[in-house]
Amino acid sequence: MTVLNQIVLTVALIVIAGEVPAENNNRDALVIAHRGASGYLPEHTLAAKVMAYAQGSDFIEQDLVMTKDDELVVLHDRYLDTVTNVAAVYPHRSRGDGRYYVVDFTLGEIQRLSVSERFEIENGVVKAVFDKRFPLGKSSFRVHTFAAEIELVQGLNQSTGKSVGIYPEMKSPAYHHIEGKDIASATLKVLQQYGYTDKTHQVFLQCFEAKELRRIHDKLMPKMRMDLRLVQLMEPSDEYAWMLGQKGMRKVATYADGIGPSIDSLLSTDSVPPDIKATPLINDAHAAGLVVHPYTFRRERDQMPPFSTDYADFLRLFIDEFGVDGVFTDFPDLTVQFLESNE
Ligand code: G3P
Ligand code: CA
């Protein structure tokens, strides 16, 4: 490739990856489609991603796991048995624990499976996790690669003129290392290939494992000449206790640009309805210069805090009162509607 061709390619990739300025559509918070428009279509299918895009999401999430032949696929679990018919197609391929691991199958084998709504098996009976959502076993959905999803989002950005971002999560890097796989390096390689290389691009890279985020920040990205926005995911458990408080948040800010806490960890136990208080986490994060993108906003009654009268009331508390910067949601349309009615 000539130097001129290289320059043209680099500029093209930057344009496709999207520069940051239009981010947020000037709304009060980012709408991050959690596994796509997963309230309406099976999670992480391309159909769910197209719907999330059409509903006006600012970012679309990809959970990532690696296959036996080192491909990154968009799936939430390291197992195939919670959203596919793997047990019927490959009945003898489970491990001793009865689970079918993505890492034991090639991409070609995985792409022969059908994807459905998330399900559980109770006493031999298959039950949808969300029984009012898309029906189990209907229509036709497949597993796809991270690259295929980026091409979908970038293709839609070109055809619509919008600048929707991606929000990949590397699932269980420590587990992948045990399996001989470096999911962080593989993810960065694909991101770089598609033009996502620095903080001005429409991407947040997220992970629950602080050790791996530090490795990405301190070693992998400098080596690859990349500097992406990183998000530290958090759960209310001992593993994350050191991150709490102003000091903890300042430590997180040495390698990350934001946090992704669970909704529970933002609700103070001192709250007495109707006076619902936030924990100090949001203020501590903001004081350290971190953005706050909590998960997961769902409209089902049993997925909202008991004191929220409806989904809009749930969003009002976290966005208008607590001041979070973005929300992971299964319902991008309702979230966009709320934010636009707020303007
Ligand atoms: O990544 C944010 C949120 O998606 C974390 O939870 O389990 O849905 O990946 P999970
Ligand atoms: Ca996720």
Image: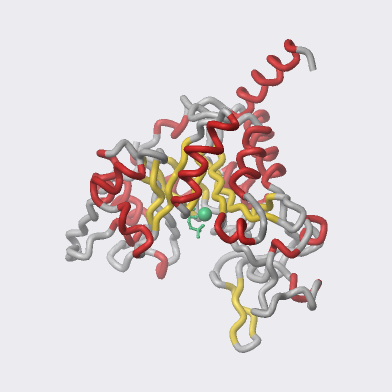
Q: Position of residue 164 (x, y in %)?
A: 55, 35
145 or 31: which is nearer to us?
Answer: 145
Give the quadrant of residue 135. bottom right
Please give left or right for residue 323 compared with residue 260 in the image.
left
Identity of the residue drawn at 40% across and 68% down = 301
**Rendered location of residue 161, percent (x, y):** 61, 27
Locate residue 28 relative to residue 203 in the image: left or right.
left
Looking at the rendering, in which quadrant would you find the N terminus? top right
Q: Check the image and name the residue furthest to the top.
A: 4
Q: Is there any visible trace of residue 58 in the rendered image? A: no
**Looking at this view, is 337 or 50 the one in front?**
50
Q: Is residue 146 above or below residue 264?
A: above
Give the residue displayed 52% in from the left and 41% down from the top.
216
Residue at image location 66% in from the left, 28% down from the top = 158
Q: How many marks?
A: 0
Front-lying residue, 46 or 278: 278
Would you place residue 325 above or below residue 193 in this image? Answer: below
Please tell me which residue is depicted at 68% across the width and 67% down the height of the picture.
101
Give the quadrant of residue 268. bottom left
Q: Quadrant of the C terminus?
A: top left
Is 167 situated left or right of 48 in this image?
Answer: left
Measured as percent of width and height from the top left, residue 176 is found at: 62, 57
Question: What color scheme is it?
Answer: secondary structure
Residue 6: x %, y % from top left: 72, 17
Q: Is residue 63 left or right of residue 69?
A: left
Q: In this rendering, does residue 197 appear at all?
A: yes
